[in-house]
Image (cartoon, rainbow, N blue to C red):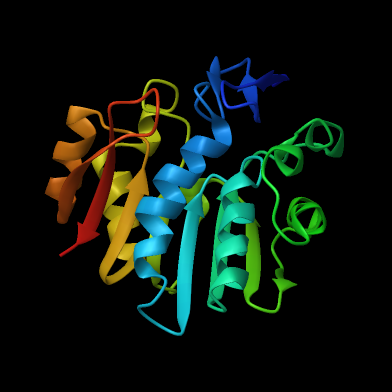
Amino acid sequence: MTLLKHIITSDGSSTLLNDKLQTTYHSQHGAIQESLFIYIRNGLLPLIETSETIKIFEFGFGTGLNTWLSSKLAEEYFKKIQYTSIDNFIISDQIFSKLNYTEQYYFPNSKEILHIIQKSEWDKIVSITPYFNLLKRHCNWSDYSTNEKFDLIYFDAFGPQAQSELWNLDSLNKLYNLLEANGRLVTFCAQGQFRRDLKKAGFYVEKLPGPPGKREMTRAIKN
């Protein structure tokens, strides 16, 4: 049985500790801070003017934090985003109720939007806002299959030390094939072997400064 422990990170925002894997869902240096820096600033924001619709694939729905922050940009820039997120573990409403994101980071209708995102039905496309559609897939990565291509991947699985099988070359090849030409992947992980495997999979790999508390992050572009 997996137990989740609620933790307050250094920026005041919530994360969860998975006791089975002994790893947290977000950086303990700051959950919201990390998501904004890696996935929004270095992932979504550079693409926001590139097309009428942006397709995002998120590996690891978790608490819904990355989804929620992405929905803010969709409304702010009047940009249509089609967002697909997978996870094989569904967090309970009781745990969701402990998370303090809307107390730490406010934008118009933020509380209502987060509630809809977290409570929305799995395996069904849901219109969260006029500019943001969400499809949450309840499945294992090994079982996930689609013909759809994405512009951006948020690779936010538990780290290689916890789930090494998600970070190997076979997994990265699968992620590469999910992307459109020139599509990109962003992640907190800066491990050397991971970067070498990204290159083997065909990615052009960028080493970027990391968020507070972390020296580096990775952005990879499909050649």
Residue drawn at x 84%, y 36% is: 97
Quadrant of the frame with the N terminus: top right
Residue drawn at x 43%, y 74% is: 147
Quadrant of the frame with the C terminus: bottom left
Residue 123 percent location from the top left of the image: 69, 62
Q: Compared to 48, does 24 lie above or below?
A: above
Residue drawn at x 28%, y 26% is: 215
29 vs 191, left or right, is right
Q: Is residue 155 visible?
A: no
Q: Compared to 213, does 60 lie above or below?
A: below
Residue drawn at x 73%, y 56% is: 117
Residue 168 percent location from the top left of the image: 28, 37
68 vs 51, left or right, is right
Q: Quadrant of residue 50?
A: bottom left
Q: Is residue 198 visible?
A: yes
Pick whichever, 151 or 178, lies toward us: 151
Residue 24 percent location from the top left of the image: 56, 23
Q: Compared to 24, does 210 lie above or below?
A: below
